[in-house]
Image: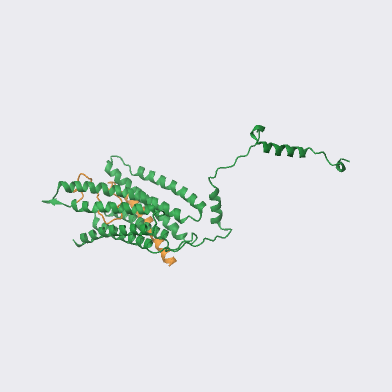
Chain colours: A orange, B green
Amino acid sequence: MKIIVRSLVIALAVTGAIATSYANASSSKSTAMAPASLSKTSAMPIPNCPPGDPNACE
Amino acid sequence: MLTTQFLNSLAYFEVLFCLAALCAITLKKQWPEYWSLGAFLATRFLSDVILIPLLYLKHERVNGHSTASAVSAYIAYFYVYWISFALESVLALIVVYSVFRLAMAPLKGLQQLGMLVFRWAASISVVVSLGSAFAPDMTRTKYLIAAISQLQRTQSILTLCLLVFVCFAIRPMGLNYSSRIFGVSLGLGVMATNDLVQSAWLTLNPGTHTARNLVNGVVICVVLATWTAYFALPEPKRRLIVLPTTSPFLRWNQISQVLGDNPGFVAVGGMPPELLAPAELEVMQRASRKMVVPFPRSMSA
């Protein structure tokens, strides 16, 4: 049990670290800034378009 | 079509699980200890309850064009989503802080030291997030989104650090894997990892909204179900912590407990007698009289 939980936690931490470095590298290479570089952990869709133009992203 | 239906069901499940977790916290009288998690869940519940009807309204169309009410609904949806996101990020930071405080409760000295370090780290991270979100030619809306995203990333990294700490120090702190502290940390850790992976995914594949929403929906439902289960089931009592006298934990705890105490003061010199109390003067006079007693005769002879 202890080994399983510890492996899971290490896997989560390593995945998070790799994802952070990957996201940082990608965002520093890209010239155009993405409207949102993160989304809420939720089933609700992310509103990325500017509020005045809801069809801009469709 | 099937995917959209499944996504809608996930949104409803999210609301239900949020409510279930809130009920479990209330019924088990855990609000004093986990008020920050309760506030986080309440914010999520309220924002979801507002966002679901707005989501339906913003898809309203006539002849392929968005109606005026759909545009207004989108504006409302945009601000409710991002403001609730910012509130949840700040509340999640407070949840991490309170979980650390609860985990370290038996070792008061290390708890104080850790909380001090945490406060400084969190404050610096928030300032850096707000500063790094700024870029030239940026509109207010873009700055809002970028700042909230940076804040969320910072909070995710801090959460993962807490999870690793709780997991590896769980036995010395008298806890086990059925403890609510571990359950809350695990849920936060899964959410944090998901956030960071989404961040990388978003920069690589900006168009895959549906797949991302599906993963997000499933992850949040699993996390909320985990929290509900941890709060609904009885928690095992914390074990008595027994440390050897040579333990560095014990030594550091003792050192940390006295850190920050008000120091005592010693009068070095130049002290006028008026500063002393009469009793102190009497003691000093008697001591002086004893010091001038002549040598015994046998010695002087």
Give the number of marks. Answer: 0
Residue A3 sits in quarter: bottom left
Q: Where is residue A4 in the image (x, y as percent from the top left)?
A: 41, 66
Q: Nearer the viewer, residue B43 or B151?
A: B43
Q: Which of B261 and A58 is in front in this view?
A: B261
Q: Nearer the viewer, residue B18 or A7?
A: B18
Q: Which of B294 and B286 is in front in this view?
A: B286
Q: Where is residue B82 in the image (x, y as percent from the top left)?
A: 28, 48
Residue B6 sits in quarter: bottom left
The correct choice, above or below, for B145 with respect to B231 in the image is above
Identity of the residue furthest to the front in this view: B278
Q: Quadrant for the C terminus of chain B, please.
A: top right
Residue displayed at 33% across by 50% down: B88
Residue displayed at 32% across by 53% down: B42
Q: Position of residue B217 (x, y in %)?
A: 28, 58
Q: Quadrant for the N terminus of chain B, please.
A: bottom left
Q: Can residue A30 be seen in this view?
A: no
Identity of the residue furthest to the right in this view: B301
Q: Is residue A42 visible?
A: yes
* Horizontal relation, residue B207 to residue B231: left or right: left
Q: Where is residue B160 in the image (x, y as percent from the top left)?
A: 40, 55
The correct choice, above or below, for B298 with respect to B222 in the image is above
Identity of the residue furthest to the bottom in this view: A1
